[in-house]
Amino acid sequence: MAKYYYLNDPEVTNAGGLFPKCPFYVLTNFHCPGCGSQRAIHDILHFRIIDALMHNVTIVIVVILLLSKIYAFLSKKFFKQYYYNLSHKAYFTYAIRVFVFAYWILRNLPYYPFTELAP
């Protein structure tokens, strides 16, 4: 799947309908927290981090969290080192939840600078 996202740009072509439209956006004309994530994944695979941030901030945060999880797993398994994992704390989960809901609301406001959050 990553190869498909690497080779096909969701912004340029729909590649035969294989890049689905966001059902929330189609029904409500509002952006959900995931809108723009397909374009952001394509940008991340091409190491265009600034473009990925412009399409969807949350997907970049998810990638950073996944990389830290992979690092924690590998350091524990192969190097027997303790890795303090902040994401296992309850307040971290609440902070992420608040961030996502705030992002969802702010990216739909029709005022500058919030219009820059829309994909």
Image (spheres, rainbow, N blue to C red):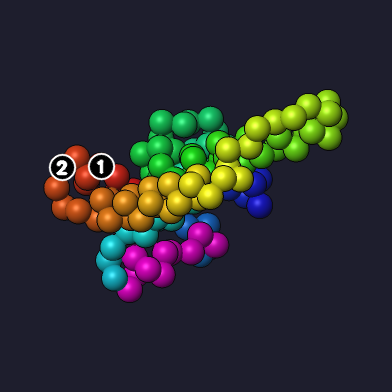
Quarter residue 33 falls in: bottom left
Indicate whether 84 appears above or below 55.
above
Amino acid, disc 1: Glu
Residue 21 forms part of the magenta stretch? yes
Estimate the spatial distance between the alpha carbons at disc 2 and disc 1, rounded to whole Å.
7 Å
Indicate whether 49 appears above or below 104.
above
Q: Can residue 71 be seen in this view?
A: no
Q: Count of labels shown?
A: 2
Q: Are marks 2 and 1 in contact (CB under 8 Å)?
A: yes
Q: Which of 67 and 90 is in front in this view?
A: 90
Is residue 72 rendered to the left or right of residue 28? right
Residue drawn at x 37%, y 59% is 32
Is residue 107 rendered to the left or right of residue 55? left
Q: Nearer the viewer, residue 111 or 95?
A: 95
Dot label at residue 79 = none
Q: Can residue 82 be seen in this view?
A: yes
Residue 77 on image: x %, y %: 83, 35
Residue drawn at x 15%, y 42% is 112
Residue drawn at x 48%, y 64% is 20
Residue 13 on image: x %, y %: 46, 53
Residue 24 forms part of the magenta stretch? yes
Range covered by the magenta-colored residues: 18-27
Residue marked by disc 2:
112
Residue 34 on image: x %, y %: 43, 55
Q: Residues within 10 Å of mark 1 (few under 14, many from 20)?
A: some
Amino acid, disc 2: Tyr
Residue marked by disc 1:
116
